[in-house]
Image: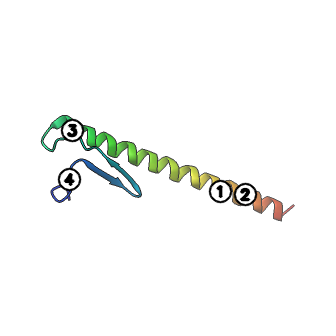
Amino acid sequence: RASTRKKDDVNIGNIGIEDSNAPLDDDDALSSVTKQKVAAAKQYIENHYKEQMKNLQERKERYNSFHS
């Protein structure tokens, strides 16, 4: 996949990050792109977990109000 995509485009899920200054052959730029991918993945996972916990809490509240 890396050969068909520009190395300065990062897309994980619905998160897109572009680094227009990243040269294709520079190791530092590749490291920068990797860091961006990690940051995007981390944010996606954190948001997903937070949403799951919110939904769980809402379900617990509905359950408790129904059974009281």
**What residue is disc 1 on?**
56
> Which of the image's four quarters has the C terminus?
bottom right
Density class for disc 2 (Cα within 10 Å; few <14, some 14-19, many ≥20) is few
Look at the numbered disc 3 and give the secondary structure of its residue.
Answer: helix
**What residue is disc 2 on?**
60
Residue at 52 percent of width and 50 percent of height: 47
Look at the numbered disc 1 and give the secondary structure of its residue.
Answer: helix
**What residue is disc 4 on?**
6
Residue at the extreme left: 25
| Cα–Cα gap, marks 2 and 1 | 6 Å
32 relative position to 52: left or right: left
9 relative position to 52: left or right: left
Q: Which of disc 3 and disc 4 is earlier in sequence?
A: 4
Name above or below for residue 24 compared with residue 68.
above
Q: Which of disc 2 and disc 3 is earlier in sequence?
A: 3
Look at the numbered disc 4 and give the secondary structure of its residue.
Answer: loop
Q: Which of disc 1 and disc 3 is earlier in sequence?
A: 3
Density class for disc 4 (Cα within 10 Å; few <14, some 14-19, many ≥20) is few
| Cα–Cα gap, marks 4 and 2 | 46 Å
| Cα–Cα gap, marks 3 and 1 | 40 Å
33 relative position to 26: left or right: right
